[in-house]
Image: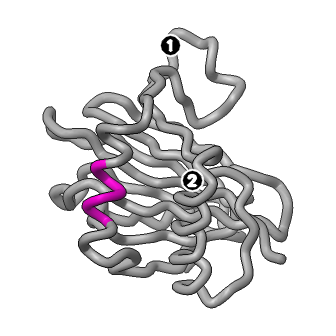
Amino acid sequence: MSAEVYKDIFPESYLRQLYGHIMTECPHYFGHTSKQSEKNDKSINKWYFCNLTDDIFLSRSILSFVADKVNSNLMLGKIYANIQFAGQEGSFHYDSDRNDTKTAIIMLSETLKEGSGIFQIKKEGYENKIETHNFERNKMLFFKSKLLHKGFAPLEVGPPRVTLALKMRHI
């Protein structure tokens, strides 16, 4: 498996507070894409995001949950929330070409129906093999940042699919 899968990353009360903070207290910006080069392309789907990198205490507390779960010393590069409604698909991309970098995707919103809001990662060493993960609240995928991956929007019209993305490196 290309991604390590962890469940119950946060205590329930912390998860509720974090989700509420992202949805009501953080400014949401429209226009986020999977690749920087797609930002000005009007034909590419875009979605909302909330940058949390400058919220030092919050970003460090989230990093500590991740580092404890994966039992590793990690340094945070950036952290943000992706907020995607139906139709706001991502595209396959990698986060870094460095071998010492890791990405964590934490699913914050309610669990979606099987096949909705999935997350795919191309398996390392295989051109056409893809690992698929259903969207489950409080689940984390932890993988090498150089692996191609893609987040899908929910299939249903309604509340958004909210994920937390952390870009890190080992120290």
The residue that appears at 71% across and 61% down in the rendered structure is 76
Magenta span of residues: 15-20
Q: Which residue is mark 1?
A: 43
Q: Residue furthest front?
A: 57
Q: Relative to residue 14, is residue 154 depicted above or below?
A: above
Residue 58 screen position, x and y as percent: 53, 58
**Sooner in the amino-acid sequence: mark 2 or mark 1:** 1
Quadrant of the frame with the C terminus: bottom right
Q: How is the image coloured?
A: one colour
Residue 158 screen position, x and y as percent: 14, 35
Q: Does residue 2 appear in the picture of this structure?
A: no
Q: Does residue 171 appear in the picture of this structure?
A: yes
Q: Which residue is mark 2?
A: 149
State the CA–CA distance, disc 2 to disc 1: 20 Å
Residue 163 screen position, x and y as percent: 41, 52
Query: Amino acid under label 1?
Result: Ser
Query: Amino acid under label 2?
Result: His
SS type, badge 1: loop
Q: Nearer the viewer, residue 79 or 121?
A: 79
158 displayed left or right of 107: left
7 displayed left or right of 157: right
Q: Is residue 18 magenta?
A: yes
Q: Are marks 2 and 1 in contact (CB under 8 Å)?
A: no
> Magenta stretch: dominant SS?
helix
The residue that appears at 45% across and 22% down in the rendered structure is 30
